Image (spheres, rainbow, N blue to C red):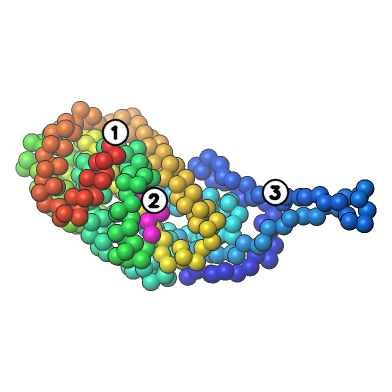
Amino acid sequence: MSTRARPLAVPLAAVLLIAACTGGGSSPSATSQASEPAPSQPEASVEESATPAPQAAVELTLAHSYQDAQPQALCGAQVIKTEAEAADVGLTIEIFGASQLGGDADRIQSVIAGDIDLDIQGASALSAVFAPMSAVDGAFVFDDSDHMYNFFASEASDDLKQGFLDATGVNILGGWNTGARQFTANKAIRSPDDLQGLRMRFPPSPQFLMNAAAMGANAVEVAYEELYLALQQGTVDGQENPLVNIDAINLDEVQAYISLSSHQLSSNLVIVGPVWGDLSEEQQQALSAAVEKAMVEEPKCVVEAEETILAGFRESGSMEIVEDVDRDAFLERAEPYLRDNFTAEQVAVLDAIRSVAK
């Protein structure tokens, strides 16, 4: 899907307008000028422009599964596009959201094959092609959003990135937190004991089901699309999801309590396929900087969205917000379970993550 190495016909005429959530971008470099005396007329000078060589143009595809108004799209994918194009190094990015280019499993194979250039996926989805990646989605592995940023922005994540590259030929450019997962039910959940007797819906993913066992939950696998009906009909008693998902499908209509456990940070990883080797050094730097910007901006957008959602619940009274969750009690149960059930490679990822905790 990429268009490789087409010479630019003309320089960009103006700085691209930056989306509101990017907070700014870099402008194209001004043409430099140098004066040199003419040999035959020492008293005169002739100005000549030192015009840089034209940058090869590369058109990239960026795929994801989110809707345009979601933070992952608006402050993730769109920021990457805006920042990379504003760098004026010959990069253009076309975004295909809402799973237009296939579901997670199909898209990762397309990235490996070079049919999709960039993709945004959760760690659990990527664990299908590199099993140690699932540890990133472990319960209580990260303390908060800053912890996840510090991991992916530091050398602590180098072994994970290199292992993924060795296994797939695909580079990880960065990762961000796209929302902490919270419990909902028709009773407050403040400790692992409160999960007893509840049928809690968890996504049908090995790591999520391991998280359920680690926290002492009785997990029932239900597809996200079927969750509202399952709660309404009593097939399950409760569930866990980020606030933006809880709000998106109106779970406050069928659940009385939301318990702010923040037991798992939902992850987004930005990956790039074989096209990476076709980019110039300047283009690689611009794309990396664009992802770095999104790593900062996307979590900010999530926080803003979550604050708005919680304010709406408080105002409407549609859900009682439980803030005094004993996270230490969950953590003390979860971490030993994960260490006992993770592979050696997953434990190594867990240790690397914990090494950059505050």
Q: Tell me where residue 180 sits by quadrant.
A: top left
Dot 3 or dot 1: first in sequence order is: 3
Residue at 51%, 53% (x, y): give it: 285
Q: Secondary structure at mark 3?
A: loop
Q: Are marks 2 and 3 in contact (CB under 8 Å)?
A: no
Dot 2 corresponds to which residue?
Answer: 174
Which of discs 2 and 1 lies nearer the camera? The answer is: 1
Q: CA distance from mark 2 to mark 3?
A: 30 Å
Is 108 drawn above or below residue 257 in the view shown? below
Q: Secondary structure at mark 1?
A: loop
Residue type indicated by callout 3: Ala
Q: Secondary structure at mark 2?
A: strand
Q: Is residue 299 left or right of residue 345?
A: right
Was residue 175 drawn as part of the magenta stretch in this picture? yes
Q: What label does residue 36 carry, if any? A: none
Dot 2 or dot 3: first in sequence order is: 3
Q: Main secondary structure of the magenta part?
A: strand
Q: Choose between 88 and 48: the one closer to the eye.
A: 48
Dot 3 corresponds to which residue?
Answer: 30
The residue lying furthest to the left in this view is 197
Range of residues picked out in magenta: 171-176
Can residue 218 be seen at all in this image of the molecule?
yes
Q: Choose between 259 and 344: the one closer to the eye.
A: 344
Where residue 128 sits: x, y (%)? 25, 63
Can residue 223 be seen at all in this image of the molecule?
no
Q: Is residue 215 left or right of residue 109?
A: left
Dot 1 corresponds to which residue?
Answer: 358
